[in-house]
Image (cartoon, rainbow, N blue to C red):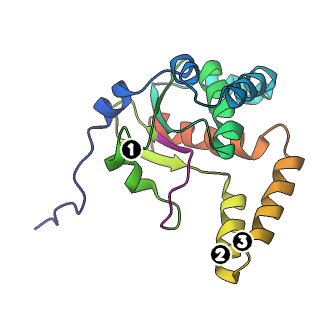
Amino acid sequence: MPRPPVLPTINWKSVFHSGKDYAAWLAGAEERSHARKMEEARKQLALEPHVEAFLAAVPRPVHVIAIAEDWCGDVVRHVPVLQRLAEAGPNVKLRFITREQHPDVFVRFLTNGGEAIPKFVFLSDQFVECGNWGPMPDLCRELISRGKGSGDVGAARKKVSAIYDSDLDRAMAIEELVRLIGTASCTAP
């Protein structure tokens, strides 16, 4: 006999359609200076030709739900990346929600038991969850976890900051996000 799910099923389609597109989300930003930074970063972000070609050829729709709020530094850094990818991929559909708007969704994506944003949830064309990302690239998340484990989160944050300073073109995030888009859009295992 199959075991029942521990958590209630989420109607991903409904959650997606309740979200805002990038322009509406950005227009509602509480921190106008952060909104300007995100727009500047989005406009300046150049994608490698192979990334552009991959995104242009995504075979079926991928729905991405971004749990994001403009006050957060990681949101300011990574939302422009996701938006640029969506602009380059006609089949990449993106909507933004807040933690308060869908607490039932957000609670499923805690980072090491804590609230951290952004969280990007990747859904297939049938609104089946295929993966998630955030609040930062894998290496950075691991460094923060190691900092917590060793009792020196401050040193870990300095290392993450150094990585961010050296990854101006956001290559780490782009690589991980493109991989998730590929997973959510695949037509075969």
Q: Nearer the viewer, residue 145 or 37?
A: 37
Residue 10's mark? none
The magenta stretch is: 113-121
Residue 148's mark? 2
User: In x, y percent, where is residue 74?
Assistant: 67, 45
Where 61 falls versus 173 (above or below)? above
Question: For residue 43, what is the image quadrant?
Answer: top right
User: In x, y percent, where is residue 60?
Assistant: 46, 25
Query: Which residue position is annotated with label 3?
Result: 153
Mark in the foreground, 2 or 1: 2
Q: How busy is the neighbourhood of tag 1: few (under 14 within 10 Å), some, or many (20 plus)?
A: some
User: In x, y percent, where is residue 171?
Assistant: 78, 42
Q: What amino acid type should be assigned to the residue bearing mark 3? A: Val
Question: For residue 161, what is the image quadrant?
Answer: bottom right
User: What residue do we see at 65% from left, 80% from top?
Assistant: 149
Q: Is residue 5 magenta?
A: no
The N terminus: image quadrant: bottom left
Q: Is tag 1's residue or tag 3's residue first in the polypeptide sequence?
A: 1
Hey, which residue is sitting farthest bottom in the picture? 150
User: What residue do we see at 25% from left, 58% from top?
Assistant: 7
Calculate the distance from the C-alpha at mark 3 to the C-alpha at mark 2. 5 Å
Q: Is residue 117 magenta?
A: yes
Calculate the distance from the C-alpha at mark 1 to the C-alpha at mark 3. 31 Å
User: In x, y percent, where is residue 147?
Assistant: 71, 74
78 left or right, relative to 3:
right
Q: What amino acid type should be assigned to the residue bearing mark 1? A: Glu
